[in-house]
């Protein structure tokens, strides 16, 4: 089993790619999406990603990171919002 804190620490200490470690929103969303993917008999299952859910965690990490990258490419002015104009300019890329 792995907790959110362990995932966060692993990204920092094991993976050692600062750009990935700075994507807390991606880690949180991927962790939350994976942790309840398969019903667990464990009383700790709601707080951890278990072995049977680990492949989902990896899948969601990749998927949400790709969304994060795409969002930052579209958000030209860096205000963490996509305006209609930014969306129109990104339409050919999508």
Image (cartoon, rainbow, N blue to C red):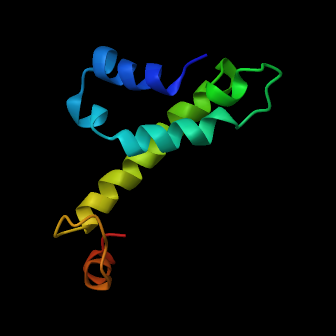
Q: Is residue 48 above or below residue 32?
A: above
- At 36% from the left edge and 39% from the top edge, which residue is drawn? 24
Q: Considering the image in quadrants, where does the N terminus appear? A: top right
Rendered residue at 32%/84% (across/down): 84
Quarter residue 43 falls in = top right
Q: Name the spot of residue 42 as percent of width and height, x first.
A: 78, 19
Residue 5, position as x, y percentages in the image: 45, 23
Where is residue 37, by image quadrant?
A: top right
Residue at 32 percent across and 61 percent down: it is: 71
Count of marks, rendered view: 0
Figure check: 7 above or below 26: above
Identity of the residue furthest to the right in this view: 41
| Residue 1 in the image: above or below residue 53 | above
Image-based side of 28 in relation to 35, left or right: left
Q: Quadrant of the C terminus?
A: bottom left
The answer to whether residue 91 is left or right of residue 42 is left
Q: Is residue 46 left or right of residue 17?
A: right
In this orientation, which residue lies closer to the viewer: 89 or 83? 83
Q: Is residue 21 left or right of residue 1?
A: left
Which residue is located at x 38 percent, y 49 percent?
66
In this view, the residue in front, 17 or 28, is 28
Q: Position of residue 76 (x, y in %)?
A: 18, 69
- Find residue 87 and report its image quarter: bottom left
């Amino acid at each position: 089993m792995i907790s959110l804190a362990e995932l966060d620490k692993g990204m920092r200490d094991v993976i050692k790619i600062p750009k990935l470690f700075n994507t807390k929103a991606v880690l949180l969303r991927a962790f939350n999406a994976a942790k309840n993917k398969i019903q667990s008999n464990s009383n700790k299952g709601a707080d951890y990603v278990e072995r049977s859910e680990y492949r989902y965690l990896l899948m969601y990490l990749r998927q949400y990171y790709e969304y994060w990258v795409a969002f930052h490419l579209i958000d030209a002015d860096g205000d963490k919002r996509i305006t209609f104009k930014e969306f129109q300019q990104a339409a050919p890329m999508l």
